[in-house]
Amino acid sequence: MTYRDTVQTDTYTNPDTGVEYKVTYWLDHQQGAPDHEFDSHGHILTLDFDPTDPYEVQERMDAGHSLIGEEFAMRAPLMRNITPYRRLKKQGLWYDYVTSLNVAVKEWGVSPENAVQAVEQDFKYIYGWYNDEWYWIGITVQRADEDDPWHYTTHSVGGYESLLFDDAQGRNEVLAELVHSLESEIYHEFHKDQLCLPLDTAAVIHLTNYR
């Protein structure tokens, strides 16, 4: 990360040790559109016309457009707009619903009876990112006590969804993992000249009492 924009800060208390941590959530600018970051999404098209308008589709078919044929025309009415036309390039992103149903069954391993639900969720997820309903965040954890000699040791990970803010259980699971990784780093740094043993709760308590 070259720079970080803080979204919010919070605290997290380790239920096993009672140690409190400062949590900083920041915008992750390295992550891009979800359909570019991961392959397991539906079929998205970049078009300079509205495929749900039969007149526009027919116009391109009559013009001999190589990608616009009878098969496309059958799928076009169910396509869903993800982004409006960009003013300069006059292009928009469209979710190919019918093709995505086939992708769900053949590539995602979804049963035919559950394909519609899976595609609906996928469309909502992708639409949400492109329309600022959610965004990528990173999380940094560090010990909250400023008198702690390890206070300025941090552990940061990006690539989380801001949807995590609405999922208390999921967020706590993520924070528990990040805190464990932070304490592992502290433990190994403190014992760097010694034989490294697995980090356990007793070791964390020992380290948090270390001054």
Image (cartoon, helix red, strand yellow):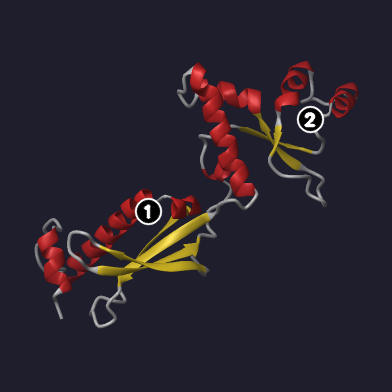
From the image, tell me which residue sits under label 2.
Answer: 51
- Tell me which amino acid carries mark 2: Pro
Q: Secondary structure at mark 1?
A: helix
Is there any visible trace of residue 106 in the rendered image?
no
Residue at x 48% of width, y 27% of height: 108
What's the CA distance linking mark 1 and mark 2? Answer: 40 Å
Q: Secondary structure at mark 2?
A: loop
Residue 175 x, y percent position in the rendering: 33, 57
Tell me the tag on residue 188: none
Residue at x 79% of width, y 24% of height: 68
Q: Nearer the viewer, mark 1 or mark 2?
A: 1
- Tell me which amino acid carries mark 1: Arg
Is there any visible trace of residue 97 in the rendered image?
yes
Residue 60 lies in quadrant: top right
Residue 98 lies in quadrant: top right
Q: Is residue 196 above or below residue 95?
A: below
Residue 206 x, y percent position in the rendering: 11, 69
Residue 39 shown left or right of residue 174 in the figure: right
From the image, tell me which residue sits under label 1.
Answer: 171
Residue at x 14% of width, y 76% of height: 210
Count residues near mark 1 (Cα–Cα under 10 Å), then give few for <14, some for 14-19, many for 20+: some
